[in-house]
């Protein structure tokens, strides 16, 4: 019985490696609210997402990754940019999104990423914002 979680983790990492080739490559910066994010940062965030997050959240951020079916609660669909830790209809601050990634939501199956460097957490949060036009509209 102990082999199943390990097998799921290996499967998830293999799936992440397979779909990374179809990930977008950024050549221009993007603006989210008041933050202009460089293409390099977005590409770093993309690489982290496809290494650590795609197995649950899916290639398009829809929460439909191959490991999602093994979870009791569905992963967040980043395309809606709806988050339970802020008032309905609002977007979290960049810092709040980084903190949510860092602390995770263990009771819902998302592990904490406490060992990840601060700049990597920030890049990952910036890449997650690319899934929903709501983040871009927030800067208008």
Image (cartoon, rainbow, N blue to C red):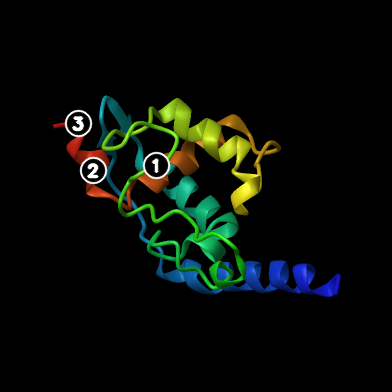
Between residue 86 and residue 120, name the one nearer to us.
86
Earlier residue among tags 2 and 1: 1
The residue lying at 39 percent from left, 32 percent from top is 86
**Label 2 packing within 10 angstroms: few (<14), some (14-19), many (20+):** some
Between residue 25 and residue 61, name the one nearer to us.
61
Q: Which residue is mark 2?
A: 134
Q: Quadrant of the N terminus?
A: bottom right
Give the answer, above or below, for where 20 lies relative to 93.
Answer: below
Q: Name the spot of residue 91 as percent of width and height, x first.
A: 32, 34
Callout 3: SS: loop
Q: Which residue is mark 1?
A: 83
The residue lying at 51 percent from left, 53 percent from top is 49
Check if mark 1's residue and mark 3's residue have beta carbons within 8 Å.
Answer: no
- Mark 3 and mark 2: Cα distance apart in space: 9 Å
Q: Which residue is mark 3?
A: 139
Please tell me whether mark 3 or mark 2 is closer to you in this view: 2
């Amino acid at each position: 019985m102990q082999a199943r979680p390990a097998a799921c983790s290996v499967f998830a990492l293999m799936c992440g490696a397979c779909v990374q080739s179809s990930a977008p490559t950024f050549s221009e910066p993007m603006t989210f609210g008041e933050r202009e994010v460089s293409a390099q940062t977005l590409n770093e965030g993309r690489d982290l997402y496809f290494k650590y997050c795609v197995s649950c959240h899916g290639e398009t951020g829809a929460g439909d990754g191959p490991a999602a079916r093994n979870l009791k609660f569905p992963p967040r669909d980043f395309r809606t940019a709806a988050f339970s830790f802020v008032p309905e209809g609002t977007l979290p601050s960049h810092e709040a999104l980084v903190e949510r990634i860092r602390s995770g939501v263990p009771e819902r199956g998302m592990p904490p990423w406490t060992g990840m460097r601060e700049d990597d957490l920030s890049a990952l949060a910036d890449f997650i914002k690319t899934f929903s036009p709501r983040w871009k509209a927030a800067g208008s």
